[in-house]
Image (cartoon, helix red, strand yellow):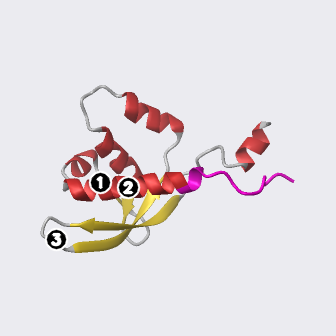
Amino acid sequence: MDLKTLQQQGGFIDGAPFKEPVTWRRADGDEVKFDVHVVRQPFGVVDEVLKTSDGRSQSARMISNCIRLGDKGQDSLTYEQAFALDPTLAFALIGAINRVNAKKSTPPTSSGVS
């Protein structure tokens, strides 16, 4: 495979956000449904998050790196805000990150090469 084909096959992350629905069951039992925008991160960012040994939460770092709020994804959470989230909400947001990455990581059904 050459570099051009690798790029055509989606081998590089472009940073485009993907709208993803989230369902959060609050502590009082109420269910809240809303959309977030998930920004996929390139390998280097994921590697940095996973290898960091500064004692900070990897999940909170991924949420602050990947999740965007607002109608157009214009709002992001700081690490401190992500760290302070209700655990059930944080798990729902991590689920959205995982779903987007799983969808986008599935190889195309056709080669896409002409």
Q: Given the image, on which type of amino acid does mark 3 rest? A: Gly
User: Left or right of 51: which side holds 57?
Assistant: left
Residues in magenta, as a range: 103-114
Cα distance between the residues tagged 3 and 1? 16 Å
Cα distance between the residues tagged 2 and 3? 19 Å
List the single residue furthest toward the top.
Answer: 53
Tag 3's secondary structure?
Answer: loop
Q: Are marks 3 and 1 in contact (CB under 8 Å)?
A: no
Tag 2's secondary structure?
Answer: helix
* CA neighbours of label 3 inside 10 A, class few (<14), some (14 to 19), many (20+): few
Q: Given the image, on which type of amino acid does mark 2 rest? A: Gly
On whether residue 106 falls in the magenta region, the answer is yes
- Identified at 26% across, 73% down, the residue is 32
- Identified at 50% across, 34% down, the residue is 44
Corner quadrant of residue 90:
bottom left
- Identified at 45% across, 38% down, the residue is 46
Question: Is 99 drawn above or below residue 70 in the view shown?
Answer: above
For the residues carrying marks 3 and 1, which lies nearer the camera in this image? Answer: 3
Q: Which residue is mark 2?
A: 95
Q: Are marks 2 and 1 in contact (CB under 8 Å)?
A: yes
Question: Is 97 drawn above or below residue 34 in the view shown?
Answer: above
Q: Given the image, on which type of amino acid does mark 1 rest? A: Phe
Q: Which secondary structure dominates the residues rendered in magenta?
A: loop
Q: Nearer the viewer, residue 59 or 74?
A: 59
Return the disc, 3 or 1, that comes first in the chain's sequence. 3
Q: Which residue is mark 1?
A: 91
Q: Which mark is residue 29?
A: 3
